[in-house]
């Protein structure tokens, strides 16, 4: 894979991770989790497709179909394994109304 191909892959994977975060919602930690999961799964999907010699939908040097499929599966797995997001509760004293 070429350097522009890597940049383009990271751009597509970042867009996918941001879109997933927009749909699912969550905190900044979830956003970082989704971005990392999308990047790793996208690159892994591309390399698995190269290894298996699949050429279904290619955009330049990128096996786009396999990479997108792997990224979606990776995002769903990350959301499932992370579980529901905890709500933050403030602890401390409450002011009493007079």
Image (tube, helix red, strand yellow):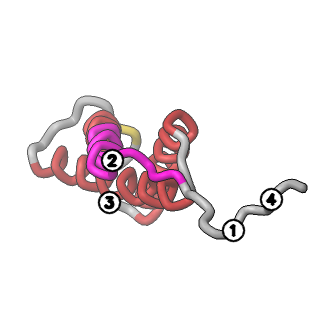
Q: Earlier in the sequence, mark 3 or mark 4?
A: 3
Kindly identify which numbered label has been placed on residue 83. 2
SS for tag 4? loop
Residue drawn 21% across the image and 53% down it? 47
Residue 22's quadrant in the figure? Answer: top right
Q: Residues within 10 Å of mark 3 (few under 14, many from 20)?
A: few
**Is 33 displayed left or right of 80 in the figure?**
right
Numbered badge on residue 93: 1
**What is the quadrant of residue 53 in the picture?**
top left
First reached walking from the N terminus: tag 3 or tag 2: 3
Q: Which comes sooner in the sequence, label 1 or label 3?
A: 3
Residue sitting at x 38%, y 56%: 39
Part of the protein shown in magenta: 72-87
Mark drawn on residue 96: 4
- Give yes or no for contact between labels 4 and 1 (Cβ–Cβ under 8 Å): no
* Residue of label 3: 1
Q: Does residue 6 lie above or below 60 as drawn?
A: below
CA gap between label 2 and label 1 equals 30 Å
Magenta-span inclusion, residue 76: yes
Question: Considering depth in this image, is 35 or 77 the residue closer to the camera?
Answer: 77
Residue drawn at point x = 64 percent, y = 69 percent: 92
Q: Secondary structure at mark 3?
A: loop
Instruction: Please provide percent x and percent y for residue 58.
Output: 33, 37
88 in relation to 16, above or below:
below
**At which x and y percent is residue 88?**
55, 57
Majority secondary structure of magenta residues: helix
Q: How many labels, in total?
A: 4
Cα distance between the residues tagged 4 and 1: 9 Å
Question: Would residue 10 be counted in the magenta stretch?
Answer: no
């Amino acid at each position: 894979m070429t350097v522009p191909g890597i940049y383009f892959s990271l751009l597509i994977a970042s867009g996918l991770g941001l879109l997933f975060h927009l749909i699912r919602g969550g905190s900044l930690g979830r956003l970082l989790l989704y971005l990392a999961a999308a990047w790793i799964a996208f690159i892994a999907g591309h390399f698995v497709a190269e290894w298996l010699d699949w050429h279904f939908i290619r955009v330049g040097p990128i096996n786009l179909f396999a990479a997108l499929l792997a990224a979606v599966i990776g995002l769903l797995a990350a959301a499932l394994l992370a579980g529901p997001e905890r709500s933050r509760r403030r602890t401390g004293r409450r002011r009493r109304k007079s």
